[in-house]
Image: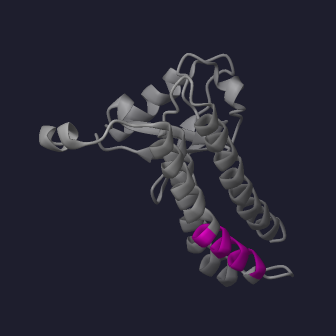
Amino acid sequence: MSYVVKWGRERLHFPLPEPSTKLSYIRKQISDYTQLPENSFKLVHGGAVMKDDTAPISAYSIRPNSTIALIGGESLPTPPKSKSAKSEPRTEQSTLAQIHAERQGVQDGLAKEVDAFVTSLPPSTPDQEQVKTLQPTHARLSELLLQTLLRLDAINAEGGWEDARKERKEAVREVQKVLDRLDGAWAGVKGRR
């Protein structure tokens, strides 16, 4: 029994440990294989970022043949000090604007692309060639939606910023819905093969 790690175009297979195993074990396995520092990447399963390395893998519903997306992998460069000295302090309004921009980007672009992709899927059993042709588009849209979820996840809504926290939660729910629609339609096509 194994699980799959999707890293860019690569699909890596690892032996699945016991359900009570901590997520940190999987992170170490992946880090050892890829030679990436353990804190330089995020792990995503079922559209959710797996943050708690002390949680058992069963908490994230990782089972045989589960697919985990590895996002990141490079250490982020430190911004020059002069730039950070000039930057404005974050406010709830600037945080809300950032969340709105992410949400608008999905509504104006990705959601429409997903709708077009879903309607372009063959209604009957697709042949091997059709699936091969459609697969890169599905992978690209899925990756872009996951990146949006990660960016929303990285937005820090301070303690008393209830509006920002609520808005981010709604934005995540909306993006997740688009991702679910994409993956559900794709699973339907793959299931008819």
Q: Quadrant of residue 115?
A: bottom right
Please tell me whether residue 157 is drawn above or below residue 185 in the rendered image.
above
Q: Nearer the viewer, residue 158 or 28?
A: 158
What is the magenta range? Answer: 108-119
Say if 140 sits above or below 163 in the image.
below
Residue 36: image x %, image y %? 33, 37
162 w.r.t. 11: above or below: above
Looking at the rendering, which quadrant does residue 145 occupy? bottom right
Tell me, yes or no, whether the highlighted magenta stretch contains residue 109. Answer: yes
Tell me which residue sits at (49%, 39%) in the image: 155
Residue displayed at 13% across by 41% down? 82
**Residue 139 versus residue 156 in the image, above or below:** below
Q: Position of residue 23 (x, y in %)?
A: 56, 24
Residue 193 visible somewhere in the drawing: yes
Identified at 54% across, 23% down, the residue is 159
Viewer-side residue, 178 vs 96: 96
**Image quadrant in which the N terminus is located:** top right
